[in-house]
Amino acid sequence: MRGNKFFIFIFLLTVFAFNAYGQEDWWKDKKYKTEEARNKYELCKKTFKEIASGFSSSSVSLISKYFGGEVFLDVIGSDKGTYNANQAEFIISDFMDYFKVVSFKYVNSYHKNSYAFVLGKYYYNIGSGKRELKASISLKYRNETWHVDQINLN
């Protein structure tokens, strides 16, 4: 009996450790040459996490605070194009009102110099079931800040 409890404990510990690691699989940490570079990419990761939190909680303000001027949008149900920050915020808000989020997650990322992007999935309920859209978000680094360059949801 004691052996079974130990086995169950180890199994649960492994499952929880895997799930905790799995949450960060989308971001590949690199060895950075300088502390400045490490800080720059930590800020990039933080920016992507806040944007994901905005999509997960349908909180447009967590996303739009990274709109630094014009944003290219290719969002299902809207015209593809470049929009100013206010227009982009309205389009994303309208999108999330219609496509009610169930969950949002990143799958993969890439970052180099002053550019970064992530690929992910936007799960939503509409009609009789859960559906999925592909998501991609790119950021550009300007004035020591990461800004949304593009959002694609289709």
Image (cartoon, rainbow, N blue to C red):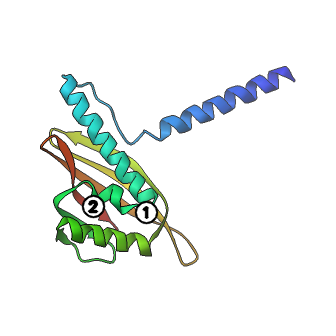
Side of 56 relative to 13 (left or right) = left
- Location of the N terminus (image quadrant): top right
Q: Label 1: which residue?
A: 58
Residue appearing at x 23%, y 25% in the figure: 32
Quadrant of the rendered image containing residue 128: bottom right
State the residue in front, 13 or 140: 140
Residue visible at 81% across and 26% down in the picture:
4
Mark 1 neighbour class, 10 Å CA radius: few under 14, some 14 to 19, many 20 or more: many
SS state under label 1: loop
Q: Residue furthest right?
A: 1
Where residue 89 appears, x then y in whole percent?
28, 67
User: In the rendered image, which residue does mark 2 sit on?
Assistant: 151
Residue 118 percent across, percent down from the top left = 31, 49
Q: Few, some or many C-alpha atoms within 10 Å of disc 2 (few <14, some 14-19, many ≥20)?
A: many
- Which SS class for mark 2? strand
How many angstroms separate mark 2 from mark 1 (CA)?
Answer: 15 Å
Residue 105 location, x and y as percent?
A: 43, 52
Residue at (34%, 68%) from the top-left corner?
Answer: 154
- Residue 31 pos. (x, y %): 26, 24
Q: Amino acid at mark 1?
A: Ser
50 or 120: nearer the viewer: 50
N-terminal of the pair, mark 2 or mark 1, is 1
Q: Amino acid at mark 2?
A: Ile
Task: Point out which mark residue 6 bears.
Answer: none
Residue 36 as seen in the image, left or right of residue 94: left
Count of picture labels: 2
| Foreground label between 2 and 1 | 1
